[in-house]
Image: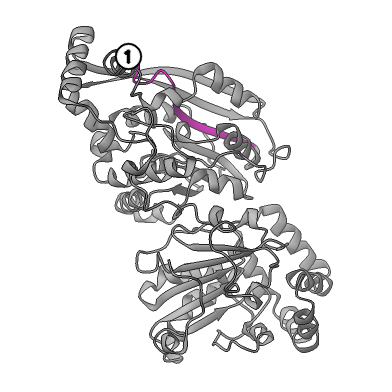
Amino acid sequence: MSPITLPNNESRSSAPLVFLPGWAFDGRVLQLRRDLDCPAPPGLLDPPALLADFGTWLDRQKIERCQLLGWSMGGLCALEIARRYPDRVAALHLLAVRAAWPDEELAAIRRELAGRPEDFLRSFYRKCFLGYRESYRRFKQELEADYLAQALQAPELLLRGLDFLAVPASGELPPAVAGRVYCLHGRRDLIAPPAQRLLVAGADCRLLEQGGHALFLDYPPPPGEPAGKKAADFAPAAALQGVEEADVPAGPREPGPAVVGPEQGANMLRRRFSRAAATYDRNADVQRQTLALLAERLPPDPEARLILELGCGTGNLTSLLLAHFPRARLLSLDFSEAMLKRARAKIRVADGLQAGRVSWLCQDAEHFLAANRTCFDYVAANATLQWFGDLPAAFARIRAGLRPGGRLLATIFGRRSLVELEEGLAAVMAGRMHVAARRFPDYPELTALLSAVFPEVEISEHRLSRQFGDLGELLRHFRYTGTGGPGTAAGFSPSQYRRLSRWFQERHGGFQVSFQVFVVSCGGGRGEAVSPAEPGGQTGFMAGS
């Protein structure tokens, strides 16, 4: 992706820059920059009105296509505009955008607005400009009094903005816009700290070491600001997209993972699930069985309001959750856009009305949990968590993201899955190739990990099996479901293939393999003891359900 630059005069003539300000601001705040003049919708930002009328506003401005410069809440509006008007958005420039606002934080803001609104807003404006002393002086002289008057005369605008912020953001974008997204975060931002940033797949993201919240004063970052070391952890979805399996350092060959770095593994796994999106449902018999086991453990709870689904895949668990929790809204995420496309279509075809209860998010599950500040009634996952790179951190963050009485409901494949194939590989390949499941947790390990975080832990163990016609069908199963793991692809010589096929026939009389499955229901914690922002070791990855 090219370096971050503001549009030049030529590009602005075809796709001018439009500014969308943050909560309790309007477009005039950009006057604090003397070198940037671009249109902005009038008045304090009102997300519902903006989203409904933006196309008409562009027409009045005689703008066919634009680039959006979205700051804070304006960045969230920019993302939604790109989804609603993909043909009219050429690029997104997102500044200081926070992924989610906790319910309790928004409730505290509402109380302040009801009790002492002017004092609260003055304090809020001061925090926005921390690190920008001269700009804050000018803001107080030129704009603050008018902003306060607008806010006090129309407090419903501020409340509608808080309602908009209450919905967790999605970094998912249509193909027409994806790849032309630029994000900037400030290390010293108190309003949208970097740990709580929104991750947008494929975006060019930077961290400005001296930056605060008012990043429209700094954008674009200075030319000397490197894109590499400081920004590497801000672009997980794009960091290694060009790496192919053949580029991975040599190690044990597996029909699953070799020893690779976490980001390499995440991108390999993402590619495999994406390639399998079209064939997944026809081949995921075992995952359908695990889903049936999970369905038996779902508690009756007609009052559940918000559910997080990790690894929604093609939407099979999504359908179950919608039917079982009739009043709940779902935040369903997966790191594969191809899987999400299938899931959206499946839910829309099954029941268009129910589809409105689901918010879709294309994001790595472990990255989402690390930045999450929203509390959910339930966190659900089918055949996903075994792929995580740091299960202890993930479990701690899941518990921290549960409301009082909330539960984790999940199925997890165990280490004894595909034990027949592992034994055959040991006999034929002499330890040079292994199945992915050897890195999955066993029963004692999983029990210890969950018990360290959740006061109440319920685990049941199950054995499932699948019969294949021959060795080729067995090995193709990994490709058709994307479940080969995050390592280098398996490779057999003709003689090794024949020996492994003969081993199965002689040892098992055919090509049947078994799967160890744990069904997990955990809760009892209020989430206040563990911070989801705690360092979690290596970055992980997630699979479809």
* Above or below: residue 45 compared with residue 331: below
Q: Which quadrant of the structure image shows residue 47?
A: bottom right
Q: Is residue 306 visible?
A: no
State the SS at label 1.
helix
Q: Where is residue 453 in the image (x, y as percent from the top left)?
A: 65, 29
Quadrant of the snapshot with the C terminus: top left
The answer to which of 358 and 78 lies nearer the viewer is 78
Q: Residue furthest top?
A: 507
- Image check: 76 left or right of 483? right
Q: Is residue 177 visible?
A: yes
Coloring scheme used = one colour
Q: Where is residue 172 in the image (x, y as percent from the top left)?
A: 44, 59
Residue 433 is one of the magenta-drawn residues: no
Q: Which quadrant of the structure image shows residue 508?
A: top left
Q: Give the range drawn in magenta.
A: 405-419
* Above or below: residue 436 compared with residue 425: below
